[in-house]
Structure formats: structure tokens, C-alpha cells
Amino acid sequence: MDTMTATSTPAPARAGRREWIGLAVLALPTLLLSLDVSVLYLALPQVTADLGANGTQQLWILDIYSFMLAGFLVTMGTLGDRIGRRRLLLAGAAAFGVASVVAAYSTSAEMLIATRALLGVAGATLMPSTMALIRNMFPDPQQMGTAIGVWFTCFVGGMAVGPLVGGALLEHFWWGSAFLLGVPFMALLLVVGPILLPEYRTPGAGRLDLVSVGLSLAAILPVIYGLKELARGGWDPVAAGAVVVGLTFGATFVRRQRVLADPLLDLRLFGYRAFRASLSVMLLTGVVMAAVSLMSSMYLQAVLGLSALDAGLWLVPQNVAIAAGFLVAPRLGARFRPAYVMAGGLVFAAFGLSLHLLIDPGDGTPLLIGGLVIAQLGISLPMALAANVIIGSAPPEKAGSAASLMETGGEFGIAMGIATLGTLGTAVYRDRFHAPAAVPAEAVDTARESVAAAAGVAAGLPPVPAAELLHAAQVAFTSGVNVVGAAGAVVFLVLAAITLRLRGSAGGDA
């Protein structure tokens, strides 16, 4: 590199006390969003009993939030770039607070579904705005990496404390308290945000293209819906058709962005090789860990017989591990080649998931939790560094769009993981399920659908065949846990090899 050029480039400004205090403010919505999701799972039985929600309504109460969040992330990321990231963040915080109050006092399942949809739209304004503001507040790459690590730690921290907070709330108050929990957070953000957070908007930004907004929703929502339905019920022509429709609208959306002077999504971001590689790392780690987490939670409840709360508590250590990894990753990335750190983390995670091959139907808790802790600690390294590359490689005026793409990829990763590796686990269960001869054929057909269905069938049988049926289902489901863990380990090893091959870009090396 030419010495004159090197010395003429000023070093990025370093953040001071004001920016670090501002980061604590940005952590408020991040912590809340993850905590809100985990609390709702515990509150659902009370919600169902109080509002009389049927099975379909229960699914929509859970899913509508993630649908709307995924659908509006791209739009809101770009909108924040144009009208001001702090302005959008504060508007979203106010909307989230109001919708939370309405949700808490919902009088019907339909009303709660509608307010959950509003919460999803409001949540879509919060996540890319916080990450984009971090990009502006911490121009120094090392400080930005640390700030992003803190952001991820808060997000995971919300998931870790969610079962504890939710359990305490629901033990002493009604289910609406789970929604009211976020109101003080948002009120505090509205008070201190204008004082501590800078404003940033893209100079000379054009108007928001509403046709592109519609096309993005028509692309994302059907795909997410279709993947969730395929994962939940297996092959279904309507769900598969929804995916095809979404992909068709997605192709139309891409063509429109190529010809617009001010596109909703600047496709030039994908021209950065580092951006593409890091986005792929984030997506595929999400695919694997979504399926592994689902199978692990079901194993704890359906095989070991733990309650939802107890199962949630057993899953807390993995969240602590990934939070610790997010804080350590920037330091490792500054000391060693980032690509080597990312690949090493993926190999470490693959080792953790390989322990799931040894789990048996008896009591595989040590191997399950130990494997999850190792895997989550391992993937925290590539995830933290990949996020740093995604946000850092985008121009400052496109930080909101880059953040929204990263978070949309995360939503797709979860949906794809459950639809692919989750379906693999179900297929293994059905293949390895061998019912005892004493169980009627029609009951066997029902029990073969899932381990939960087998438990339902067993409840109506005499003690001896019921115990035999449950054991057969638990053995079959454990085989699914083994196979999904092995498949995830293979994916991580392949991803590690690709990361090393692309070390000049994926790891952010010069």
C-alpha cells in the first residue's frame, strides 16, 4: 500500500461516553423484543383459557408477529435511512408501547391477533434502526464490533431471562402483564432517546416507492407462511403454492429495484463480496440452530417429561454461552484473522452438535445441554463478526437497509431451519417409530404423526400398552434428535471450509 495514501487517510473517530450511554439506550428495545417473544410462549395457555382461542387462533397469536416483523423489516430499514433513524426508532417505540397496552387488555382472540400484528410492524421499525444507529455512533471498526456484540448480548439476554421473568409474572398476575412489561422500557426510550441518540438520514433521499413496498410484502409474507406451514404439517399444496407465489413476487421486486432511481432496496449492497458471504453465514447458522433448538426443547418436554418452564430453564445456559461469545468475538477478531476466528467457531459448534449423536431416550440432558452450550458459544463468533462485516461494509447511508437484510435473513433462517432440518427430524421419527403389537392400527397411524400425537394416543390406552407406545415414540424421536444434530454439524463444517476459502472477504481480511 502506498505510504502517502495510508498516512493521508484519517483514523475513524472514536466513540466517547455519550455514545456508550446511547448504546445502553439502544439496548432497551433489543432486550424487550426478545424477552417479549419468550414470555408469550409461557402465557399462551392462560391466553387460550381466558379468550377461548381455538387451535388455529393460537397459532396466529404466535405467528402473526413474526410474519409482520419479517415482512416490514426491509421497508422500515430503508424508511429509517430516508426520514431519520432516530425519528423512526422513537415512532416505533411509541407505537409498540400503545399496541402493548391494547394487547394486554384484549377481550377476544381476534383482537389479540390484530394487536400482535401491530406489534410486529412496530418491532420492524426498532431492530434495523438500532443497528443502523450503532453504525453511525461507532465509526471505529473495533468499537463498532464491541457495540454490535453488546447489542447481540442484550438480544440473547432477553431470551435467557424471559422464562424467569415470565414465570414470575404469570405466577402472580394475569397474562396481560406479559405485554405490559415492555411499556416502561418504551417510555424510558422516548424520554432519553432524543437527548442521547444522534439523528441520521440519507442526504437527498428520494420518496418511498409504495409499489416496491407492496411487492416486498407479497414476496416475503407468502414464503414465510408457506415454510412455517410445511414445517408444521408436512407437504401441503397450498403451503407450497404460497412459497412459489412469494418467490414470483420476489423476482418481480428485484427487477423493479434494478430500474428505479431510488430503489426500496439497493441491490448494489450484494456487490460487496464480504456482504454476501457474511449474510450467508448468518442465514445458515440460523437454519441449523432453529431446528436444533426446536428438537432440543421437544426432547426435554416429550421425552424427559419436563414442563415448559423447566425446559426453558434448562435452555438458559446456551443463551449465557452465546452472549459471552458475542462479547469476546470482537477481541478475537482484532487479534487474529477474522476468517480464522469464524471458521474456528464453526468447527467448535460442529463438535458441540456432534455430541447430540450420543443422546439416548433415558436421560440425555448432560449431552444435550452441553452440546448446545458448545454449539452456541461456537456460532457466536461467526455471527458477531459477520454482523460487523455486514454493517461495516455497507456505506453509512445504507446502514438501515443492510441491517434490515441481516435481520430478514435471520427470520428466513428460522423458518427454513424448521422447514428443512425440522422436517428431517420428523421424517426420522416416522421411519424409526415401531409401535407395540397391542396398540390398535388406527392409534398407531395417529401416533406415527408426531411424538406429541403419540402422547395423546397413549393417554387413552391401558397402562402397559400406553407405556410401551410412549417408549417407542421417545426412542424414535431421540433418533430424530441424533440425526438433526449430525446434519447441523456437517453444515457447520462445510460452512467453515467455505469461510476459509473466502477468507479474503468473508472474514473481512484485507
Image: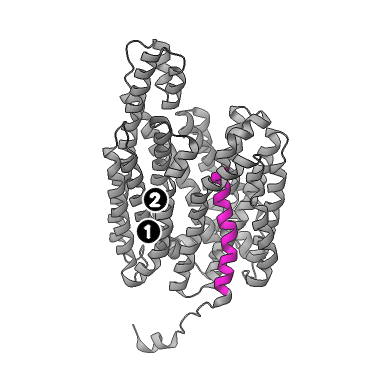
Q: What's drawn in magenta, residue-wise?
A: 19-39
Image quadrant in which you'd find residue 287: top left
Q: Residue 84: tell me if it is visible.
A: no
Q: Nearer the viewer, residue 433 or 496?
A: 433
Indicate yes or no whether the magenta region holds residue 28: yes
Which amino acid is tagged 2? Thr
- Label 2 sits on residue: 285
Expressed as whole percent of the image width and height from the top left, the position of residue 214 reads: 63, 47
Q: Nearer the viewer, residue 469 or 116?
A: 469
- Element carrying mark 2: helix
Q: Nearer the viewer, residue 170 or 39?
A: 170
Which residue occupies 32% across, 11% down?
437
- Label 1 sits on residue: 382
Which amino acid is tagged 1? Pro
Image quadrant in which you'd find residue 417: top left
Q: Residue 403: tell me if it is visible.
A: yes
Dots 1, 2 in contact, CB < 8 A: yes
Indicate yes or no whether the magenta region holds residue 212: no
Expressed as whole percent of the image width and height from the top left, the position of residue 123 reads: 61, 52
Q: What color scheme is it?
A: one colour
Which residue occupies 62% across, 31% down?
48
Which residue occupies 38% across, 89% down?
4
**Does 300 sit above or below residue 198?**
above
Which residue occupies 36% across, 55% down?
377
Expressed as whole percent of the image width and height from the top left, the position of residue 111 reads: 71, 37
Q: Which dot marks residue 487?
A: none
Mark 1 to mark 2: distance in Å?
Answer: 9 Å
